[in-house]
Amino acid sequence: MDKMKNDLPIAVFDSGLGGISVLRDLRALMPEENYLYFGDSVNAPYGVRSREEVRGLTIDAISRLYDRGIKAAVIACNTATSAAILPLRERFSDIPVIGMEPALKPAVLEHPHECVLVLATALTLREEKFSHLMEAYDTLAEVISLPCPELVEFVERGQLEGDAVDAYLNARLGPYRERADAAVLGCTHFPFLREAIRRALNDHTVLYDGGAGTARQTRRQLELWGLRREGGQSGTVRMENSLLDPEILSRSRMLLELK
Ligand code: DGL
């Protein structure tokens, strides 16, 4: 085991602040690791862009992080994963590159023949990766896909509750309020709006997100590659953003520490 190499940070990347929800799960599972979070808020939201644009932005961002020295990259964004995971793995083949997908599988398996909503960005929902997921699971339950791009913008502004959030969610989710047995939060920004989403749906609706599963997958990959950082002391977290505004960094810290 190469101790120096294992001390390098795990890069965690998102179009903006959403991936911080995954960083929280990573830290909860592996507090001894060092993390370098990079949010591309200048270019957020990614979910309304074309696949080519998102692919280009994601590869550029990961290239810059890679050149600084990282031991793994977590693409903490369903949209960027859908658009870029294969070229990323090809280009950075000497580190593990971990991606995400909407947690449709557990939602459907735990709610057979019931109604499962998938909330995600428009790009995630129209990409091939999601079509394959749907082919595998949509015969097992009634799956309804709902693009919710505005939710990304609420989180980017640090607006996690309030009348505007509730009005949007009531309009978007209201029609499914009585029917939805499960809802998949298929965008890493959405777990920050969990309470508001729950209010707009029903008390019995079970919410799923992919953060904890991605953290476990990252741990498995680090173990396979012999890259775990050992020795009980807790690691460091460095937060960066393409938006050079102190406000975005304090919002990032607030989201990271949120109870
Ligand atoms: N957080 C991202 C995701 O998981 C996308 C947000 C965006 O549209 O930029 O899909």
Image (cartoon, rainbow, N blue to C red):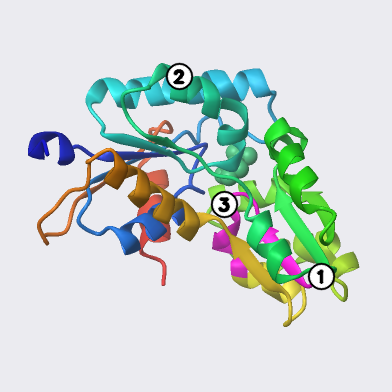
Q: Which kind of residue does numbered mark 3 sit on?
A: His
Residue 67 location in percent, x, y? 27, 20
Numbered disc 1: secondary structure: loop
The amino acid type of the residue labelled 2 equals Glu
As measured in the structure, the alpha-carbon distance from the residue carrying label 1 to the one carrying label 2 is: 39 Å
Q: Residue at x 50, y 26 (%)?
A: 58
Earlier sequence position, callout 1 versus callout 2:
2
Q: Residues within 10 Å of mark 1 (few under 14, many from 20)?
A: many
Examine the rendering and report whether any part of residue 162 can be seen.
no
Q: CA distance from mark 1 to mark 3?
A: 21 Å
Give the magenta range. 180-194
Please state if 210 lies on the left or on the right of 219 as rendered.
right
Q: Observer-nearest residue: 237 or 142?
A: 142
The answer to whether mark 3 is within 8 Å of ligand 1 is yes
Residue at the extreme bottom of the image, as rendered: 203
Q: Which mark is residue 189?
A: 3
Q: Which residue is mark 1?
A: 180
Amino acid on which the number 1 mark rests in the picture: Ala
| x 32%, y 29%: residue | 95
Mark 1 or 3 closer to N-term? 1
Q: Which residue is mark 2?
A: 90
Whether disc 1's CB lies below 8 Å from ligand 1 is answered no
Q: Residue furthest right?
A: 175
Q: Nearer the viewer, residue 85 or 253?
A: 85
Tell me: residue 192, above or below residue 95: below
61 is higher (above) or lower (below) than 23: above
- Residue shown at 38% from the left, 21% from the top: 92
